[in-house]
Amino acid sequence: MIAKSFIDEHRLSNRKACALVGMSRSQFNYTSRKKEDSNIVRSIIEIKERYPSYGVPRVLATLRRRGFVINAKKVYRIMKTLRLQVPKKRKAKSKFRSVRSNVPVTSQVGDVWSMDFIFDRLKNGSSFRCLTIVDNLSREVPGIFVSKSMSGFLPIDFLDLLRRKTNLPKHIILDNVLTNNARCNFEQRSPCRS
């Protein structure tokens, strides 16, 4: 401390040395009263060795069961100084990321279509749904089915309507639009491979 050196070397009083440094005398005379009980520290280390995944709340509960009178702040401070904290959990990466390695490459317009549902709301708050079908090469939209309610709606019926107007593609890429049964029914009714 600088104030201490002024007192020792220049034989100044505490008051003058603290005034020169810009420190209050209470701060200069402060001595910490924190007593780290070695039994508590030893018990915390023992608990963490036995249960490394325990955080402050569980360590505190275990200490209190053993008869120690201690608060959570002290347990936290001791665990932090000893670096016994449990690391924060990272967000788990999504398990459902699909790798599209078998996406067909398109060379002609109308070879590959993609189907997906889109949900939105009108200005008055009522929701509506759209089944969109997009050509992957030209980005043209062969058809959109829009409805406020799609209960009882089967995308297969909409594809049957499109079949009457245009030729169906060789491949259709789906994003959870059709269930397996409906997809099988469609494959039986259509020459298109989805």
Image: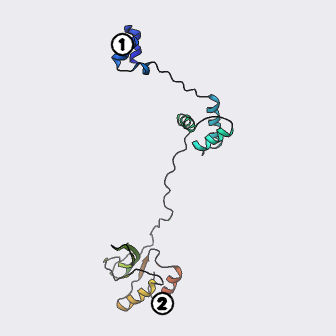
**Which residue does the numbered mark 1 point to in the structure image?**
16
Q: Is residue 193 above or below residue 70?
A: below
Q: Residues within 10 Å of mark 1 (few under 14, many from 20)?
A: some
The part of the image, by quadrant, that contains residue 68 is top right
Q: Which residue is pictured at 36% across the width and 77% down the height?
A: 106
Q: Whole-percent x and y of residue 94?
A: 49, 61
Q: Which is nearer the N-term, disc 1 or disc 2?
A: 1
Q: Whole-percent x and y of residue 51?
A: 64, 44
Lateral position of residue 45 relative to residue 139, left or right: right
Name the quarter where the N terminus is drawn. top left
Disc 1 residue type (three-letter): Lys
Disc 2 residue type (three-letter): Arg
User: For this rendering, which residue is in front, 163 or 105?
Assistant: 163
Give the CA distance from mark 1 to mark 2: 99 Å
Q: Whole-percent x and y of residue 172?
A: 42, 80
**Which residue does the numbered mark 2 point to in the structure image?**
189
The part of the image, by quadrant, that contains residue 112 is bottom left
Render colour scheme: rainbow
